[in-house]
Amino acid sequence: MILRFCISALFLTGLLLAKIDAAPRTNILILLADDLGQRDLVCYHPRSFYETPNIDHLAAQGVRFSDGYSANPVCSPTRYALVTGKWPTRAGLTNFLPGNRTERFQGAPLTLQLPTSETTLAEALKPAGYHSVFVGKWHLGANESDWPEHHGFDENIAGCSAGHPKRWFSPYQNPRLKDGPPGEFLTERLADETIAAMKRAKESGKPFFIYHAFYQVHIPLEAPADLVAKYEAKAKRLGLQAIFKPEEQIQISVSSARQVRQNQTLPVYAAMVESMDHATGKILAALDALGLADNTLVIFTSDNGGLSTAEGSPTSNLPFRAGKGWLYDGGIREPFIVRWPGVAVPGMVETTPVTTLDIFPTVLDAAGLKTNQGDGIDLGPLLRGEKLAPRDLYWHYPHYSNQGGFPGGAIRSGDWKLIERFEDGAVSLYDIQKDPGEKTDLSTEESQRTREMREKLHAWYRETGAKFLGPLEKGPAAWSPYKIDPGP
């Protein structure tokens, strides 16, 4: 009798394990906007000039992170962090590619492509049978050997070295995208490509990982004429006029102060935001129509803050200071939305700071895989409404940005954020919750906290192999934390 019971138990256990193994893998859809500030979305800024009903609806269905951050204030490093889960500092990929301008000092040495030695999300998902598709802006290396198909993606649609499209309307002049009918709009076309990829994956029976990287809302600014006209009329009806103020700077470089846009008024930018939102809605509607939505993890975020201090300064990030290319929160605070049916609590707003690096472990957990790679954390517990142990977030930008930003590093620890400038080593400290505009430097009043946070930041520099500014020919010696803080 006992033997018969054991055999029956083993048989039932085998059936249960077979059912678990046969359970479909969670599909993964990452939607990455380009240069979209957090305040560009109505779900983060109800008084926004722009209209984003589809992304707002996505936020209502999932978890919206109030303190979501990009890994870097410019694009390529954040894209590296997304596909590897690592601090960009580790690879020396700390600026947009191939930018490395000089001013008073030479920018730090820059790695010019995603190293082939890195294990990307697409490669990490292969053992679980995922079909991986890249759609849109890649910008992680100039040579074809650097592009998505050489980093684990089974399909590459429109991914190349370009940091922005040569043309928004067909013919596109993109080496990885066939031209469409004359006048076809790139954003709509790429949405259609993602939908087609989802259909192919469903027919194949394989789980999919689709990384859809919008080229929007990066310059050049261009959108369908009817949408631009809509926002021209809206701006006129509301009597909007653009307002600019100078960005106060302490830096000792030769850069002059930049003018920062204070309000959202630009019709063409608003049209670009809405067309990106429409494409997002189109993709999400297709997930529903295909019966895939309930088994798909969707993550929406951006690669850096909104452009507000250069190249037309098309948007405002207020109350956050500055924008793209700056270490202030205007340059790194992002929309960060996660919808995961059955896991993420619908409509929840989570205040725990999170970052691009967290996408890697979260995706692998959703796929039923575990990883020791990377510097991020699995967001699954937060999505379920649980709490995680506090941690510090770091940024390292040893370059002069095209947008006027200074070379520096930063650490956020709890409600506090410290910024260190690499030209002279000056530091500033902000209570980021009480002072989101980073207007009041508390480094003198909070001298002990400043010292402790700076020590943490320097230890992180050493741990990640951070590189710093170099001198120009016959120029002054560059400051380095290693000179004053050699470490153990």
Image: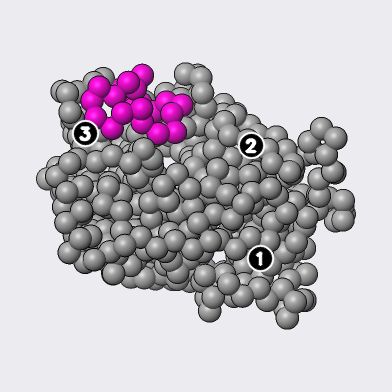
Tell me the crowding category of disc 3: few under 14, some 14 to 19, or many 20 or more residues within 10 angstroms, Cα based: many
Q: Pointer 2: what residue?
A: 101
Q: CA distance from mark 1 to mark 3?
A: 42 Å
- Between disc 1 and disc 3, the foreground one is 3
Up-down: is 66 above or below 173? Answer: below
User: Does the residue at mark 1 contact the one at mark 3 (Cβ under 8 Å)?
Assistant: no
Q: Residue at x 54, y 75 (%)?
A: 435
Q: Residue extending furthest left?
A: 289
Q: Residue at x 72, y 64 (%)?
A: 427
Left or right placement of residue 231 versus residue 407 in this view:
left
The answer to which of marks 2 and 3 sits earlier in the sequence is 2
Q: Pointer 1: what residue?
A: 418
Q: Which region shows up in magenta?
A: 155-177
Q: Quadrant of residue 208?
A: top left
The answer to which of marks 1 and 3 sits earlier in the sequence is 3
Tell me the crowding category of disc 1: few under 14, some 14 to 19, or many 20 or more residues within 10 angstroms, Cα based: many
- Between disc 1 and disc 2, the foreground one is 2
Q: Residue at x 70, y 50 (%)?
A: 253
In this picture the colour scheme is: one colour
Name the amino acid, label 2: Arg
Residue 446: x %, y % from top left: 72, 78
Name the amino acid, label 3: Phe
Along the line of sight, which residue is nearer the eye, 474 or 354? Answer: 474
**Residue 173 shown in magenta:** yes
Q: Residue at x 77, y 39 (%)?
A: 470
Residue 148: x %, y % from top left: 43, 27
Residue 335 at least partly seen: no
- Between disc 2 and disc 3, the foreground one is 2
Q: CA distance from mark 1 to mark 2?
A: 25 Å
